[in-house]
Image: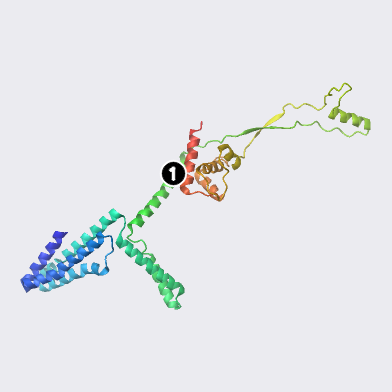
Amino acid sequence: MLATGAAGGAGTFSNIKGVYGSGTALGAVAAGEGATAVLALVLLGLTMLGQSSPAVVRLGLWLLPAAAAVMAAMAADGAGRTVIYAVTPMGMCVAAEGMAFLARRIVVHTDGRDAEAEHRAAAVVRALAYHRARAANHPDMRTRKSSERTSWRLARRIGTGDASLGTRLLDVQRERVTDGADAALADMFGTAVTPERHAVTAPVTPALSPAPEPHTDPAAATAEVEAVTGSRDGEDTQVTSTMPEAEDESVVVVVTAVTLDEVAAVTGVPTPRPAEALSDAQLVVVLRHLRYSADPPLSYRQAVTAFRDGGFVGGEQRVRKAWGALMSQEESTP
């Protein structure tokens, strides 16, 4: 880049020297390429310091070589030489811009911030805030409409050229794509595990025999009552009842609806409550309860939907981690 700038200055000096002499040529090179070199050093220094460059510096990098190009073109005596003389000073402009661009990219790579992009973004945001306020509160309707249109044009420029913003948006998009692929693979290759049914043995009162028809004879009614309730004889011996014995005094009841409290009690954690911060173990309990609340068990998306509808609180990453722990437990359970 330095060689390109030096060659452009030497060419301009040689072109003008043949027409106006050495002194005039030296002054033209100093006013054109020399001043451009000074502005290039200023731009390079500000870029390396992580500061934005003033607009007059960036404008001078193009105006000064352009002025030298016009002066050189006026010294040419033919169309071909005019073009060559006019293009020669622009080498300094390209060299200066190239050095500044490379320095800016080095600073962005090293420090992670672009001062020029931040300066432009701040200017756009300030202008947008001003025009939005003027569009909402200015007394003149025409001014409000003008600011409304201007604010929409400024909105398109927000984030333009911001490398850090683009990197963050790509990270967010990668995370969403990863989550979607994980959920899709879990739905496709997840093994459905039948939940264990808890058998509860509950004592049941044996069924009584049909009640006898009422008798009109009081004595017979009294005898029937004694036969049912039982009595003691004269030797204080227990008299057996006439009630028929039940074939089995217990039945097995299969519990098909397990509550969240029961799942939490079996796991040994406090019962999860909606709208409360949940621990990792409580998240697994809630997801286990929701997954097996239907037959067949719910998928990840269905369980997350039920989780949100139930009012439970938990970040997406924590919920996905708890779901992975649940799936790992199912796979390791014989």
Q: Which amino acid type is shown beneath numbered disc 1?
A: Asp
Looking at the picture, tell me which residue is in the foreground, 81 or 121. 121
Neighbor class of circle 1 (other Cα within 10 Å; few <14, some 14-19, many 20+) is: some
Looking at the picture, tell me which residue is in the foreground, 293 or 116. 116
Residue 328 is left or right of residue 28, and the answer is: right
Q: Position of residue 279 (x, y in %)?
A: 51, 44
Q: Position of residue 26 (x, y in %)?
A: 9, 70
Camera sees residue 217: no
Picture residue at 10% right of the left edge, 65% below the top: 11
Q: Position of residue 130 (x, y in %)?
A: 40, 71
Which of the image's four quarters has the N terminus?
bottom left
| Residue topped by disc 1 | 182
Q: Secondary structure at mark 1?
A: helix
Looking at the picture, tell me which residue is in the foreground, 185 or 114. 114
Outermost residue, top direction? 235
Q: Quadrant of residue 241?
A: top right
Camera sees residue 162: yes
Looking at the picture, tell me which residue is in the foreground, 269 or 165. 269
Query: Vertical placement of 217 versus 134: above or below?
Result: above
Outermost residue, bottom direction? 140
Residue 45 is left or right of residue 124, and the answer is: left
Q: Quadrant of residue 7?
A: bottom left
Query: Vertical placement of 322 versus 6: above or below?
Result: above
